[in-house]
Amino acid sequence: MKKNNNNKHAFMIMARDADINLRMLLKSLDHEDNDIYLHVDAKAGIIDTTGMVEKSSLKVCDRINVNWAAQSQVSAEMLLIKAVISENIEYKYIHLLSGNDLLIVDHDKFHNFFKNTNKQFVDIESIDEKINVRRIKYYFPLQELVGKKHGVLWMLQKVLMYLQIVVGVNRKTSLYNHIAKGANWFSITLNCGIFILNKEKEINKYFSKGQSADELFLQTILINSEYKNDIINNNQRYTKWNKGENSPEILTMNDLKSIEESNKLIARKFDYKVSSNIMKKLTETGVD
C-alpha cells in the first residue's frame, strides 16, 4: 500500500564525499516535502550525516565504489531508484543530482513547477550518434580502472574494442530503434522511475560494461518506450560548458546573473573552494 502524499519529492544524490559541497546542497534542499536519498562513493570511507538536514528525511543508501564513465555509475543510480521505490511513497517526482549541485529557486517555486505536469525532464543531447552506439555495442571491461586517464589501460581497452569490431561483436543494439545520449541528471515521475527499475535486467544485459552508459541507458530506454512522447528535452539544470571539456565549469559569482536569467531550477557544478560566495548567496536567498 503506497503512502499517499503527492506533494512530496524524492531527491537522489550521487556524491563523491560527504564534504562542504554536499552540506550546502542539503541545506538548499532541506524542506518537509523533500525526502533525500544519498549515495556517497564508498571510496570516501566512513561518513557522518549528523545534523546535515533539519526538515527533510535523509536516507543513506548502500554504497559502492563509483568510477568515471563506468558501469558503477549506472549501478549507483539504480541503487538510488530502488531505494526510493522501496519506501512505497507516492512521490510527485524523483530527481537525480550530483553532490556538486544546488537548488537555485525557493521551495514553493520548485514544487509549483512540477505541480500540474507529468512530463519527464530528461536531457537528450544526441540520437543515434555513431560514437554513442559504439559505447554499448562493444564491451569496455577496463573502464572501472581507466577512468579519465589516457594511459596504458586506456590504450589496451581501445585495442580490445577494435578486436571486437574485427570479430563482429554486437551487443544487439538493434533491440532499440534509437540510441540516445544526454546528461544523466533528470527529473522524472514516480511511475517512470518504477518503469526504469522494472527494466533492470535489460539494463544490466545491454548496458553493462559499456562506456559512459550512465549517459545512455535512461535516455535510450525512455525514447524507445511509451514515455517517448512525455519527454521534455530540458532537465531544468543550469550547466556551463567549455567546448571540448568532459566536465562542466565550476560556477562562481561571475555566473550569478546568468543563473538568475536561466529560468532553471538546479545548477551545477559548484566547488566550495572557489564557489563559496555564490553558494552562500544561493542557499540563503535562492533566485527570485
Image (cartoon, rainbow, N blue to C red):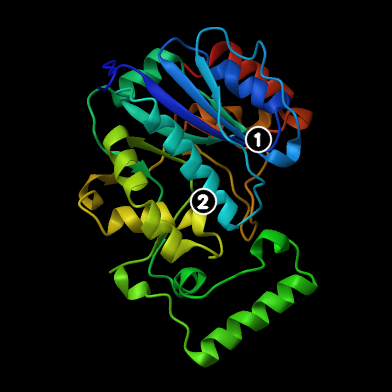
Q: As displayed, is residue 37 above or below residue 240?
A: above
* Circle 2 or circle 1, nearest the eye: 2
Indicate left or right for 254 with 201 as reference.
right
What residue is shown at x 59% (from left), y 87% (from top)? 163
The numbered disc on residue 220 is none
Indicate left or right for 152 with 76 as reference.
right
Q: Secondary structure at mark 1?
A: loop
What residue is shown at x 67% (from left), y 67% (from top)? 142
| Residue at numbered disc 2 | 74
Where residue 237 sits: x, y (%)? 48, 37
Pick whichever of labels 2 and 1 is earlier in the sequence.
Answer: 2
What residue is shown at x 30% (from left), y 25% (from top)? 92
Which amino acid type is shown beneath numbered disc 2? Answer: Val
What residue is shown at x 47% (from left), y 11% (from top)? 31
Which amino acid type is shown beneath numbered disc 1? Answer: Leu
| Residue at numbered disc 1 | 251
Quarter of the rendering containing residue 99? top right
How many residues crowd mark 2 within 10 Å: few (<14), some (14–19), many (20+)?
A: many
Nearer to me, 120 or 66:
66
Indicate left or right for 127 with 225 as reference.
right
